[in-house]
């Protein structure tokens, strides 16, 4: 969900105001397509998002028009030793991958369209806490 402001891109403006992924960012981008628990996970793992974006940009600079978000997570997991904030045994859990891809394409204008994403099941019925639908009925 693209809304005004808070969009980063290739060295441009930044929505980091002390709490990189606080409630404001979630309110701007959460359109009901992010995995359950993604925003809470992201608050603890800002470093994973940063490295995810760096690797995506590196692939793009090397000529990739589109790349696998899961591929990026695999590279981060096995080659860099990057870990989630809780230091679990898996280094990085791949459940956050769809959310990372969606958010990177929303926030980083140079990565718009770089990943292919699927609409999650039930997106048409997803509701915000106030009861309103995330997706406007057509």
Image (cartoon, rainbow, N blue to C red):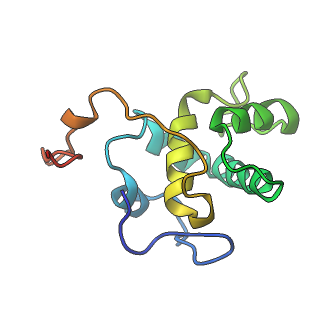
Say which of 85 and 2 sits in front.
2
Residue 77: name its quadrant.
Answer: top right
Relative side of 15 to 1, left or right: right
The vertical placement of 98 against 59, above or below, is above
Residue 137: name its quadrant.
Answer: top left
In the picture as drawn, the residue positioned furthest to the top comes out as: 89
The vertical placement of 76 against 19, above or below, is above
Relative side of 125 to 2, left or right: left
Residue at the spot x=37%, y=73% of the render? 4
Residue at the spot x=38%, y=62% of the render? 2
Q: Residue 96: horizontal and vertical position, in percent?
A: 55, 35
Say which of 125 and 50 sits in front.
125
The vertical placement of 38 against 27, above or below, is above
Q: Residue 123: horizontal and vertical position, in percent?
A: 28, 35
Give the quarter of the figure containing the N terminus: bottom left
Say which of 76 and 105 sits in front.
105
Q: Residue 111: horizontal and vertical position, in percent?
A: 61, 58
In the picture as drawn, the residue positioned furthest to the bottom comes out as: 13
The total number of labels drawn is 0
Residue 34: name its quadrant.
Answer: top left
Residue at the spot x=61%, y=69% of the render? 9
Say which of 96 and 58 sits in front.
58
Q: Residue 17: horizontal and vertical position, in percent?
A: 52, 72
Residue at the spot x=38%, y=35% of the render? 119
């Amino acid at each position: 969900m693209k809304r005004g402001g808070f969009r980063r891109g290739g060295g441009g403006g930044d929505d980091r105001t002390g709490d990189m992924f606080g409630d404001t960012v979630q309110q701007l981008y959460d359109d009901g397509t992010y995995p359950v628990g993604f925003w809470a996970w992201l608050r603890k793992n800002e470093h994973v998002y940063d490295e995810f974006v760096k690797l995506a940009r590196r692939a793009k600079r090397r000529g990739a028009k589109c790349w696998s978000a899961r591929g990026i997570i695999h590279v981060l997991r096995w080659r860099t030793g990057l870990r989630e904030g809780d230091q679990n045994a898996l280094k990085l859990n791949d459940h956050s991958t769809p959310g990372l891809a969606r958010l990177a394409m929303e926030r980083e204008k140079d990565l718009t369209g770089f990943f292919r994403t699927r609409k999650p099941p039930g997106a048409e019925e997803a509701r915000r806490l106030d009861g309103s639908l995330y997706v406007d009925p057509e």
